Amino acid sequence: MAAKIAFFDLDGTLVSSNVVHQYDWYARASGDFKRRLRLALDLPRLGWLEFRSRRRFNEAFFRHYAGFHQSWLVENAPQMFRQLLQPALYPGAPLLVEKNRRDGFFTVLLTGSLDFAVQPLAERLHFDRVVSNRLVFENGIATGQLVAPIVAEAEKVRAMKAIITEMDASTSHCRAYSDSASDLPMLEAAGNPTAVNPSAKLRRIALNRSWRILDLKAPE
């Protein structure tokens, strides 16, 4: 039987939080008020960059992590999950991931969030694989740079295709779930795309293309 793969975005799709919330949690936990101030002052620029390019947003946003100790970030990830991501998890999200597993799909969390930040959530939802962004560390200190390739836009599609080829699967046997029109290439790369908690733009596209639309804010 041919392999079947289900690819899931995270922010806005499975949880109501995003990468900015994750960084803000770490900044608060560190007790460094200046980090939160710098982020607040940078938000208008980051919003403009996100509108233009998710990749450019990632390159700029993750520079805020510069100076953090890798060991501290990893050690505090479980607490961040309990205090931020778990409460933000949409009620229908665990049910959707589990349904795909029962249907025989290999589940992949495909996200622009950082690896250590999403690992506890990935374990909680029993994902088979995680593809995420990673920080560059030098002597255990974050430089603010990301390890290439940056997981965003076309790179998500390349990651999908690599896994599909590795597992000798067919795109017609693959599912993709996202909430954002910025992930349109990701949705188009799967034979069975689903718009989850979609933005107004993605909802219009999904309706025009007769794609499935899901609301995970309440259990099915």
Image: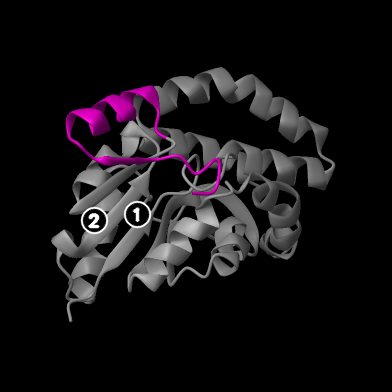
138 lies left or right of 108: right
Furthest residue toward front: 220
Crowd around label 1: few <14 · some 14–19 · many ≥20 (10 Å):
few
Q: What residue is pinned by disc 2?
A: 158
Residue 81, image quadrant: bottom right
Q: Nearer the viewer, residue 34 or 220?
A: 220
Crowd around label 2: few <14 · some 14–19 · many ≥20 (10 Å):
some
CA gap, disc 2 and disc 1: 10 Å
72 lies left or right of 20: right
Q: What residue is pinned by disc 1?
A: 149
**Placement of 138 over or under 213, stated as above or below:** below
Residue located at (32% from left, 30% from top): 202
179 lies left or right of 67: left
Q: Nearer the viewer, mark 2 or mark 1?
A: 2
2 or 1: tag closer to the N-terminus? 1
Query: Could you say where residue 1 lies in the image, as x and y percent from the top left?
Result: 18, 81
Residue located at (30% from left, 42% from top): 153
Q: Nearer the viewer, residue 36 or 95?
A: 95
Circles 2, 1 touching at the beta carbon (< 8 Å) = yes
Residue located at (61% from left, 56% from top): 117
Identified by mark 2, the residue type is Arg
Q: Magenta segment: does it hold 211?
A: yes
Query: Could you say where residue 78 lies in the image, as x and y percent from the top left?
Result: 71, 62
| Residue 211, numbered label | none
Q: Magenta segment: does it hold 49?
A: no
Identified by mark 1, the residue type is Pro
User: Please, what secondary structure does the residue beneath circle 1 have?
Assistant: loop
Residue 60 visible, this angle: yes
Q: Which residues are magenta?
A: 198-220
User: Please, what secondary structure does the residue beneath circle 2 have?
Assistant: helix
